[in-house]
């Protein structure tokens, strides 16, 4: 399905992504871990075409994603929905309208200007909010919701696109542990029930090991690990984060205690 071969991204002389090659041949839940600056977010932005690649190839179901432009590029961004750490909602707009923004690429300029939506889309948006457990907030302004609720609104907006793939860039980094679990549980259910590919940048080992079928480790723009949760040993973690890593930022002490206990 998704094939990445020799993908590079240069910012001046700095290689943010360095010769990245990987293949996801079926709808998996893929977690990407690594230090800040490892190239995780840059990679997702290249997949979604928010950032252009410097070189390499990236195909999905045989389609050359890096060659798309204009309407074809916008269509791809509908097929490849993006969820961000800071939600990217319109704070003063009601929740259901924020969700309906997931259909913007399909609507005319006039309909967008006057905020006109088909009734069927409104009903579908409410159904998606119900699925995520926040339909009672449909008429509230987005800014009135908690962080965890806002992230679920962002997930609902992504689902309105009916995407083939969902990219989640640190979706729980700004959430408390309870809301982080709710959001990750929702993403996992979407993967299992809908059969959608999900690729998520994650900031703790524990989250990656709990939710992901496959884990990619990145360091200095390069892929240094590609395997299952069971293969993510303490030694591998130190290869990803560096031998001198204390794991106070990138992974919790619970993560390390679990790894030490299992792989000692």
Image (cartoon, rainbow, N blue to C red):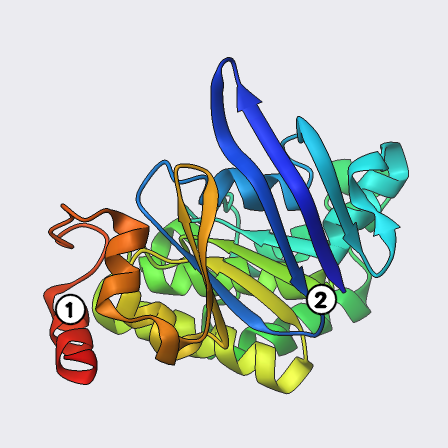
Mark nearer the N terminus (1 vs 2):
2
The residue located at (39%, 37%) in the rendering is 220
Residue at image mark 1: 256
- Rendering coords of residue 62 (x, y %): 87, 57
Q: Look at the image and tell me whether residue 110 can be seen.
A: no
- Rendering coords of residue 253 (x, y %): 10, 66
The residue located at (64%, 78%) in the rendering is 127
Left or right: residue 89 versus residue 229 is right
Name the outermost residue toward the top.
Answer: 12
Image disc number at residue 122: 2
- Residues under labels 1 and 2: Cα distance? 46 Å
In the image, 90 versus 52, the foreground residue is: 52
Q: Is residue 48 above or below residue 149?
A: above
In terms of secondary structure, where does tag 1 sit? helix
The residue located at (85%, 33%) in the rendering is 69
The residue located at (31%, 67%) in the rendering is 180
């Amino acid at each position: 399905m998704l094939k990445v071969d020799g993908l590079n991204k240069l910012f001046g002389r700095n290689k943010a992504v360095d010769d990245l090659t990987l293949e996801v041949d079926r709808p998996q839940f893929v977690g990407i871990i690594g230090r800040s600056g490892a190239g995780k977010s840059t990679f997702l932005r290249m997949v979604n075409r928010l950032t252009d690649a410097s070189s390499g190839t990236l195909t999905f179901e045989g389609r050359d994603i890096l060659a798309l432009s204009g309407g074809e590029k916008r269509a791809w961004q509908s097929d490849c929905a993006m969820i961000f750490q800071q939600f990217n909602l319109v704070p003063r707009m009601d929740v259901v309208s924020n969700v309906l923004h997931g259909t913007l690429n399909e609507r005319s300029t006039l309909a967008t200007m006057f905020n006109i939506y088909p009734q069927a889309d409104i009903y579908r948006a409410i159904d998606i909010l119900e699925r995520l457990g926040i339909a009672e907030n449909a008429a509230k302004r987005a800014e009135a919701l908690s962080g965890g609720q806002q992230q679920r609104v962002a997930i609902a907006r992504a689902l309105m696109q009916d995407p083939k793939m969902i990219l989640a860039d640190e979706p729980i980094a700004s959430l408390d542990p309870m809301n982080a679990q709710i959001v990750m549980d929702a993403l996992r259910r979407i993967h299992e029930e809908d059969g959608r590919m999900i690729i998520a940048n994650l900031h703790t080992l524990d989250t990656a090991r709990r939710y992901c079928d496959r884990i990619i480790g990145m360091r200095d723009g390069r892929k240094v690990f590609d395997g299952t949760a069971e293969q993510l040993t303490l030694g591998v973690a130190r290869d990803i984060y560096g031998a001198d890593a204390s794991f106070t930022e990138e992974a919790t002490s619970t993560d390390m205690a679990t790894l030490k206990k299992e792989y000692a």
